[in-house]
Amino acid sequence: SGTGEGGTGCAISADLLGSLAFRYLRWSLGLGAFGTPKGLDARLRARLFQDLDRSPSVDFVVLYAHDKVYDTSGSLRQDLTQLHTPNDYVLTLAREHPKILPAASVHPDRADALDELERAAEAGAVLMKWLPNSQGMDPADRKHRRFYEALARLGLPLVAHTGGEHTVAIRWPEYTDPARLELALDCGVTVIAAHCATKSGIVDPEYYGTFAALARRYPGCYGDTAAIGTPGRFRHIPRLLADQGVLAKTVHGSDYPIPVSAWWGLGRIPLAEIRRIQGVPSTLERDVRIKRAAGMPEAHFRTLAGLLPKRAWEKKGLAPPS
């Protein structure tokens, strides 16, 4: 995201920009932890492109937009919106870098939700991204059926945050439960439960078992391994590796630009390999190498490609993966 400089349309609230978590994130990206950084949008864009160019293991990334908060009546809640990355900005970045595939974010309570979904898909969006416990959409609300049916018709997977969250404010903690995604699955949507519903903080609820049950029950239910290279979630790698059925229903996710470290794998990853991985300058590349060193199979890094609509690859002038 960014502050909107240069006409990007991005926005970050003052409380999020000054939060401890966001200061640490800024510091990890070399953007300075204090004050309002000048040219933040351009600097974030430059850092992303640099990390992509320094990631030989990464063929493509799906870059997420992030919609504003709306209430159930469809009214914009600017007062509750901490972060906004417009669909158009992500679509623009996808045109500027060959490794970027754009993901839209459309709040289903918006009055124009279906129109914006269709527009984003036509423009090249390859999936839909929600953070329900922060953006305020209830995935289980039956009035979203038409939205889900449109997603299924367009072939757009839905990536929805599940489990712990400590970067942005959580206003609807009940929406972190992956069981609330059953309506979307019943409508034929391919659903990816972000983080496999794992907990990240000590007091977070543990929803991994719920996710695992859904992944076994629904052919279209997957989970991603975003932020699994962080202290609260690394412990779930052995759990996934021990359950081949669930492991096969996971896709690689990075949670970029959240920093990851191979040191959380000490005891599973050899010390010499940890030091080599920590010397990798790109967060995106480092994340892949951490998971490989921890034992994640190569198939894990390619599953997502087969879930995206064929037009995702046609826009890049490539044949769809077989």
Image (tube, rainbow, N blue to C red):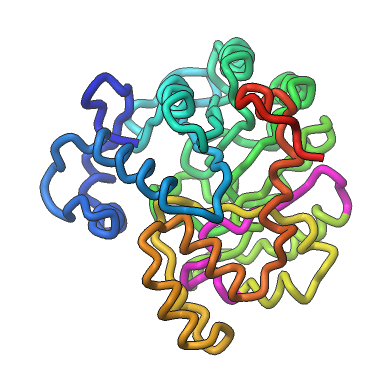
Residue nearest the observer in this picture, 190 or 47: 47
Q: Is residue 240 left or right of residue 118?
A: right
> Residue 267: x and y, percent?
54, 89
- Residue furthest to the left in view is 35
Residue drawn 30% across and 40% down? 46
**Where 110 falls versus 175 (above or below)?**
above
Residue nearest the observer in this picture, 93 or 114: 93
Q: Is residue 21 magenta?
A: no
> Residue 129: x and y, percent?
57, 36
Where are the magenta residues, as a range? Answer: 217-235
**Where 3 falls versus 95 (above or below)?**
below
Q: How many marks?
A: 0
> Residue 264: x and y, percent?
47, 78
> Residue 125: x and y, percent?
59, 25
The main secondary structure of the magenta stretch is loop
Q: Is residue 2 visible?
A: yes
The image quarter containing residue 261 is: bottom left
- Quarter of the image with the C terminus is top right
- Quarter of the image with the N terminus is top left
Residue nearest the observer in this picture, 171 or 304: 304
Residue drawn 44% across and 46% down? 52
Residue drawn 56% across and 33% down? 101
